[in-house]
Amino acid sequence: MFTFVMIYFVPGCLLMVCAYCGDTNSQYALGVWYWNRCGNYWSDIEARDRWWLRAAEAGHPHAMFQVGYFHRYGSSSVIQKDLAKADFWIHAAAKAGDDDAMTLLRESK
């Protein structure tokens, strides 16, 4: 049991401390952690979206892409379906140098 706690919860706690201190990479990574923790049974989409939005607003390029991508479909009450916001965030991500955003924009022409 102790090993499970150390492997599973400690990384999330460390990410949370850094994310609350304003580190954008940690904010993005914490969103990923909330999405992937223990598979689909424990994922927390609302928390994921809150952290990704926070990272995007702070200028994290891939968080911008993820926020824009999920605004296309709506994934939670935090990131609702809004095509104008999707376009804004995807273009911002491409301008910030995110490869996925640039590929998406290139393919959609």
Image (tube, rainbow, N blue to C red):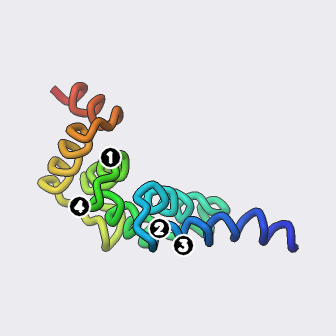
- 73 relative to 42, above or below: above
- Foreground: disc 3 or disc 1: 3
Q: Residues within 10 Å of mark 3 (few under 14, many from 20)?
A: some
Callouts 3 and 2 close, C-beta under 8 Å: yes
Please tell me which residue is depicted at 56% across the width and 65% down the height of the picture: 15
Quadrant containing the C terminus is top left
x%, y% of residue 11?
Answer: 66, 64
Mark-to-mark CA distance, 3 and 2 = 5 Å
Give 81 or 3, whichever is nearer the viewer. Answer: 3
SS class, disc 3 = helix
Q: Badge 1 is on which residue?
A: 61
In the picture, the disc for residue 19 is 2
| Mark 3 vs 4, N-terminal side | 3
Q: Badge 4 is on which residue?
A: 81
Please tell me which residue is depicted at 49% across the width and 60% down the height of the picture: 26
In the current view of this chain or complex, which residue is farthest to the left?
Answer: 84
